[in-house]
Image (cartoon, rainbow, N blue to C red):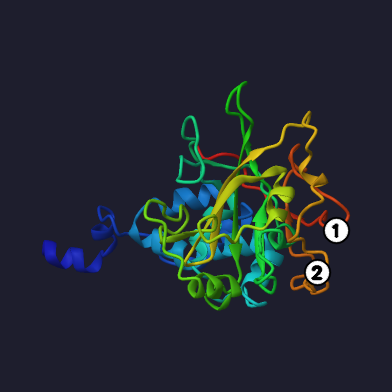
Amino acid sequence: MSATQRQRFNPMSQDCGSHDSGILDERILLLVLECVKWDLQIICLTASVNHKLRAIAKRLLWRKLCVYRAPRMASALTNGSPNGRIGGGWDALAKLMFFCCGCESTRHFKLSRPTPGHFAKASRFSKTSGRSFLSKWCRGDLLFVSDPCEHSMGDKEDDLGIYRGVFRGFMRSKTRACLIRKQVAFDERVRCPYCGTRVWSMTTARLIPKSAARRLGSRDGKLEYFVCVNGHLHGTCWLVPLSSDEEACDDDDDDDVDEDDGVGSEDLDGDGEINGVAYGRHTATNGSTSSVGEDVFGNGPIN
């Protein structure tokens, strides 16, 4: 038998040295990942092996991870169809769920030094928090926003809060329509850290309600956030110290609160929230905005 014939009868000999070789049956991979409860680190490692596994992860594994870790949030974002598509892709949503993007100085938010991104062990997203980030013209939108990830900036500075969020059906949202109607230009320097697309500065658009600062535990004017064309939100804020006389939750002059917006009675996804660890020490809550939800953990940082 010639060498050519031996290769024809033994196709695996060609695949052994190929960068594109991969698993022959996706069902085996799914069973393995189900056994490890869709471990984030294992999926990251799997997607980094070769192009074929990266394509499988993009098409299937990231969606499975999101649905397993945050079933109510995934259901809400896809209108009850967990197999449906989502703006920016499931890989971007998975990164948003578990990755704090860090930040650098921007036009409206100055830092003494940049803060690097990192994987978060646990995160808490809430549609109740999301309502506080919607202007009174956009209250019909559904937005999930995380509690701020707290970063110490030194003894002479307040702690920095970094938060992120995601809209449902952003292409049809009132927020996008408002940005288009106001002819707000894209930010020239910032890109979405989760899908890489262009972003709008909500500070430039003057669409940040005062209730956002209260919800974050910050002061009015001490925060900024961006929204990308796929509906991913990321932002920063200076967190009010516990010793401050101006607790964010005591801000009574908010002319843009959401107590009578007609949205609170519409429970679009059960309770629509993800609960990781307990509230951060700066997070402001009160009777109209505090809530509980489901836990989502990232199995520790990626090494």
- Check disc 1 and give the amino acid type: Ser
Within 10 Å of disc 2 (Cα), the crowding (few <14, some 14-19, many 20+) is some
On the rendered structure, is 232 left or right of 198?
right
- Whether the residues at callouts 1 and 2 have beta carbons within 8 Å, the answer is yes
**x and y percent of residue 203 in the render?**
54, 55
Distance between the alpha carbons at the discs numbered 1 and 2: 9 Å
Residue wearing tag 1: 288
Looking at marks 1 and 2 on the same chain, the residue that comes earlier in the sequence is marked by: 2
Residue wearing tag 2: 264
Q: Which mark is residue 1?
A: none
- Does residue 39 appear in this view? no
Residue at disc 2, secondary structure:
loop
Residue drawn 78% across and 57% down? 293
- Total tally of numbered discs in the picture: 2
On the rendered structure, is 92 left or right of 237?
left
- Check disc 2 and give the amino acid type: Gly
Q: Nearer the viewer, residue 143 or 74?
A: 143
Relative vertical location of residue 1 with respect to residue 187 in this rendering, above or below: below
Which residue occupies the extreme right position in the image? Answer: 287
